[in-house]
Image: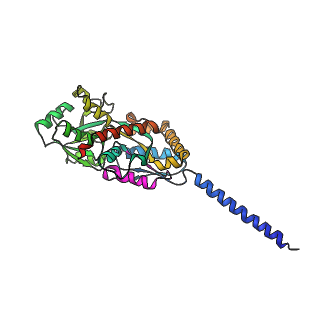
Amino acid sequence: MFNKGKTFVTLLLIVVMIFTFNVVGIGQEAEEYPSKTITLVDPWGPGGTSDIMARVMAPYLSDELGIPVVIENRPGAGGQIGTIHLIENGADGHIVLTPSEPTIASAIALNDAPFSWDDLTWVTMLHHDPICLNVRKDAPLNDFAEFVEYVKDNPGTFSLGVASGSGPHVFCEYLKNEWDLDIIVVPYQGGSPARAAFLGGHVDGAFCQTASSLSIADESKCIGVGWSERSTLWPEAPTFQEAFPDETEMLEMAEMLASYRGFMVASEFKEKHPEHFQKLLEAIRNAYNSPEIMKEFDKVGQTSILWFSGPEKANDISAKLFEVMTKYAYIAK
């Protein structure tokens, strides 16, 4: 005989079980990370050093996370366009920025950026890349001292291409203000277009970094590296210290303004999902430690500037860079 009461109870139990499973599934899905494609946002144009770093890391990071990892270039406003995109859309950790410091510190301290350090946090830095000065091979300049002397003898005639808001950009402005060097500083939206301008004859020199300047090695010579030791990438290039051993402030400024590249996320992501942040950190660490990836970095000339900092050291460096930028904020006026 058909038992309506028993049938109703059975159906009710089935509905409750289905609802319970769905709720659990939704909860599990919400806890999964990553749950969709990770986008590495490079705030510069394609072909720059941070863009190359991201493209080398992406497939290895994808293997670690078990999810596609893609690159998206969002250049503009000295790195601010890509940074703002991260802050506005990166709360769930699926958007990761590949910045090049000190451009963010520069944007906040010098250019009144619509964000602050509280909005951002490093996962890790992967690059430490000193600034350097490249000129044409036939230029009558062989070290930084000769460059300074030439500019003093020929004021307002020598132009330098730089990435807007970068360490080299700030250093050039420092030289103009503190050393009274009448140089023409031409900012571009990234190091790649600055070097392209140099190759096209639009500027007389390119002030960039040791690794990124390798792309113009055939058409240029490096006449100075802003570090205490010579670069293995440009072993023939004298350091700024060799040219001006007693100029302590200038040397400290040059060293501080090296480029630091890596991976950064929105602070909201780390604050709300610390376990997901840790998972991303470990995935980057494991990818970085892969023997195979070192071969890839070697192919693009980045091995000598690799450095895994971790989040604490990276954030500490950025804080110090911000202090430097704040101290010299007048150069942007």
Q: Is residue 15 above or below residue 87?
A: below
Where is residue 30 shown, x and y percent of the image? 58, 55
Question: Start and end of the magenta stretch?
Answer: 75-99
Give the colour scheme of this rendering: rainbow
Q: Quadrant of residue 16?
A: bottom right
Q: Can you say whether 212 is above or below 74 in the image?
A: above
From the viewer's side, name the closer residue of 125 and 219: 125
* Rendered-image quadrant of the N terminus: bottom right
Whether the magenta-drawn stretch holds residue 173 is answered as no
Left or right, 273 with respect to 195, comes to right
Query: Which residue occupies the foreground of this view, 225 or 155?
Result: 155
Residue under the point 44% across and 37% down: 295
| x then y, percent, for residue 171 | 26, 39
Residue 94 falls inside the magenta stretch: yes
Q: Residue furthest right?
A: 1
Can residue 59 be seen by looking at this rendering?
Answer: yes
Residue drawn at x 62%, y 55% is: 27
Q: Residue at x 76, y 68 (%)?
A: 11
Give the quarter of the image for residue 236. Answer: top left
In the displayed structure, 188 sits above or below 228; it is: below
- Residue 10 in the image: state x and y as whole percent: 79, 66
Instruction: Please tell me how many numbered marks the rendered image carries.
Output: 0
Residue 239 visible in this rendered orientation of the protein? no
Q: Nearer the viewer, residue 284 or 216?
A: 284
Q: Position of residue 198 (x, y in %)?
A: 23, 45
